[in-house]
Amino acid sequence: MIGAHKVVFKGNIFSRDASCIIEMRKIRIDLLNVPRGLTLPIEGITIGVFDGLHRGHRALVERLGSLCETGEKGLVTFSEHPKVLLAGESPVRLLEETRRERLLEAWGLTWIVELETTRGLLSLEPEDFTERLFDILTRVRVVVVGENFRFGKERRGEPRHLADPPQRRVETVGVVRENGEIVSASGVRAALLERDFEKVERLLGRSYSVSAEKVGGDGIGKKDLVPTINLVPPPEAVPDGIYVVGTPRGFAVCHLGDRPVFDSKERRFEIHLLDGLDDPGWGMWEVTFLKYLRPVRDFPSVEELRKAIEYDIERAREFCKGRQSEPSRERR
């Protein structure tokens, strides 16, 4: 912890006021109240919300990597979506933070600089924002942003405002399109709401998956229905329903939502492995959404629910014939 600034340790931060090197990889900063002398050893950055990490984001990071082959590279982002303050909207997060960090690291970034999202930050004049940011990022020599990137008060800041001094190289990357549609986080959300996982995969460049921690259940499935593994529910970007999913232990049928047959309003995330349930242990599971089967609905009896589940399993087995269950892969 540096002052009131939340940090996650991994990497290096150098401060002129410190007599030691603090190892860290992620730092959250109030740009209007930066600890004196704080500088970060980052040489190349990209800037944006980076929600969902779709193909457009991947294009920015790849361009940054080609221009800054050596040295630390990082993402400058925001503690929450600016739309929350600017438009009163609250977009549902597409990724849990830990998974987002792992993907960014796999793409070659070593830092996340998270700016505290406040009205003060969003109302900074472009020149003031740039000066404050690069007072911390003194070593940055390459900046890559989208061609439509805007920042600062009334979104008046443009990429050219970031190129001061002139020796700091600023490059813009054009939008990425899929079948004529601009790839965007809002497009991914819309496809998820439609449960169109093939389109989601095309927009993301990978299958949509979540990381979920295994938790204890109440034993109802094993006793009255089919044995299940209980997980912490994923972000609400995934609508409730019955799905076919992939897991590290093979294909499964997934129940996401409440359990009306048992008068339970609690949102549950339960999976039944098609190849049987050996002892899965505890820890994190990666679950990849593959196909929507049906909505969560009430049944007149537990027996009727069990018959519906058996039919879900039958449909899932048919869908999975000839497929390989494996973790979500990056696709170009």
Image (cartoon, helix red, strand yellow):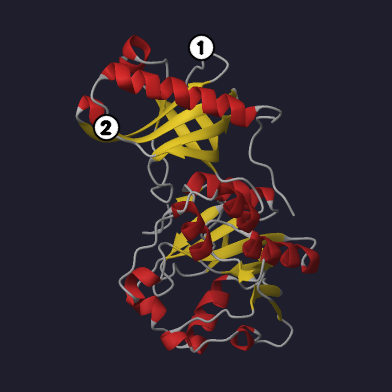
Q: Nearer the viewer, residue 28 or 14?
A: 28
Kind of residue indicated by mark 2: Asp
The residue to which callout 2 is attached is: 298
- The answer to whether any part of residue 43 appears in the image is no
Q: Nearer the viewer, residue 79 or 265?
A: 265
Percent from the top left, x then y, of residue 112? Answer: 56, 58
Q: Which mark is residue 236?
A: none
Could you say which quadrant of the image residue 70 lies in?
Answer: bottom right
Could you say which quadrant of the image residue 233 lies in?
Answer: top left
Q: Residues within 10 Å of mark 1 (few under 14, many from 20)?
A: few
Q: CA distance from mark 1 to mark 2?
A: 30 Å
Side (left or right) of 46 relative to 88? right
Could you say which quadrant of the image residue 109 lies in?
Answer: bottom right
Asked if 314 appears above or below 213 in the picture, the reply is above
Disc 2 is placed on an element classified as loop
Asked if 289 appears above or below 51 in the picture, the reply is above
The residue to which callout 1 is attached is: 279
Percent from the top left, x then y, of residue 150? Answer: 53, 82
Kind of residue indicated by mark 1: Asp
Side (left or right) of 297 relative to 96? left
Closer mark to the observer between disc 1 and disc 2: 2
- The answer to whether any part of residue 113 appears in the image is yes
> Mark 2 and mark 1 in contact (Cβ < 8 Å)?
no
Percent from the top left, x then y, of residue 76? Answer: 55, 66
Percent from the top left, x then y, of residue 278? Answer: 53, 11
Name which residue lies at 23% across and 25% down. Answer: 300
Quadrant where the C terminus sits is bottom right
Q: Earlier in the sequence, mark 1 or mark 2?
A: 1
